[in-house]
Image (cartoon, rainbow, N blue to C red):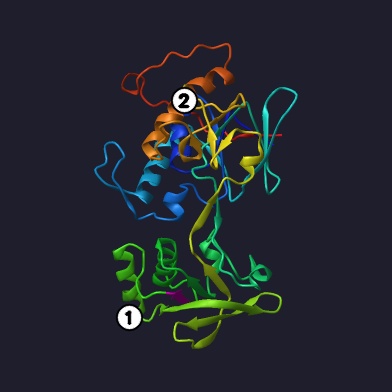
Amino acid sequence: MIQTEILIIGAGPVGLFTVFEAGLLKLRCHLIDALPVPGGQLTEIYPKKPIYDIPGYPEVLAGDLVDNLLEQIEPFKPTYTLGERAQTIEKDEEGQFIVTTNEGTKHRAPVVMIAGGLGSFEPRKPPIEALPNFENNGVYYFVRKPEFFVNKEIVISGGGDSALDWATYFAERDMCSSVTLVHRRTKFRGHKDTVQKLYDLQDAGKIEVITNAEVVDVKGTDELDTVVIKSKDGEITEKYTHSWLPLFGLSPKLGPIGDWGLEIEKNAIKVNTFDYSTNIEGIYAVGDVNTYPGKLKLILCGFHESTLALQSAYNIVFPDKKYSMKYTTVNGIQGFEEKKEVEA
């Protein structure tokens, strides 16, 4: 069992900044996220989208903001459970929360900070009847370990940043036997620089780009070996492949958190704006996952909410201590010594 002081559900930008504010209070954090890497939507959906409302940055790319946040919290040595979804919550005899993931990993903490953005993200799956037969057996919705695809023939579907980024990543490194990108339109939604790189790689013979078409079926015996591609003019092509990656983005859902006994309004968690606490003592909700009168769904607002929530959470973790706030310009940033989370 993983023991920590602040258990954060969601490793998006607000969840990551929560680690920083907790670190200033000498509170240790562990984060759970259903995605395989930190960053939430910023990493998975639009890493190259410019953001304009972060203080001190006239413009910053979403992926760069995540990198900066990770660098900012590094002194506080947060730990992670990634690629797993927070499933259930209960209290033990000592009043601490036990949060168990869909993979059975248990976490224990006196405070739970829900920073899950719009909720847990589920991959958008194409309506193909045979698809479940090959999930994680030739069909993959995430690239968790790029080296898994070395020397394999792969087909990627999608027209956004995630599909383009991974297609160009594999192609320019010559990692795979072949790389094919299939998109149902001729125009891509991804960053212009990446689109140009894609076509440069196509001209160099490193990738095959098929537009105005989509994968409509998958075939195989024990594992995937063929995708069926249909063009807009009705032409059907069968293409042999080891792996198909349908990267159509993610669909936000409140998920199992909606069954935790929290007060829910329009698929969001109601909070007290004094400290962004929920109706369950010890559980807070910050960022896009919460709701209150006047709520604005901005990263900036989530940063503010987590800062105030942690002032209250400190009193739960250390009921016998009184925290005296000191400005970082005076106190500096004092990180933790390297220490692994306790496992029982």
Q: Residue under label 2, please give it.
A: 273
Lower position in the chain sequence, tag 1 or tag 2: 1
Give the residue type at disc 1.
Asp
Residue 181 is a magenta residue: yes
Q: Is residue 262 above or below residue 140?
A: above
Question: Circle 1: is it few (<14), some (14-19), or many (20+) Cα within 10 Å?
Answer: few
Q: Is residue 49 left or right of residue 120?
A: left
In the foreground, 86 or 289: 289
Q: Is residue 141 magenta?
A: no
The answer to which image quadrant residue 217 occupies is: bottom right
Quarter of the N terminus within the rendering = top right
Outermost residue to the left: 58
Disc 1 vs disc 2: Cβ atoms closer than 8 Å? no
Kind of residue sitting beneath label 2:
Thr
Q: Is residue 199 above or below residue 101?
A: below
Report the front residue among 218 and 66.
218
Q: Secondary structure at mark 2?
A: loop
Residue under the image location 41 percent in, 64 percent down: 160
Picture quarter with the C terminus = top right
Residue 126: % across, % down: 56, 68
Q: Tell me the chief SS of the magenta region.
A: strand
Q: Is any part of residue 335 visible from this angle? A: no
Q: Secondary structure at mark 1?
A: helix
Report the span colored magenta: 179-184
Whole-number angstrom distance, CA of label 1 to CA of label 2: 55 Å
Reply above or below: 207 against 322.
Answer: below
Q: Which residue is mark 1?
A: 203
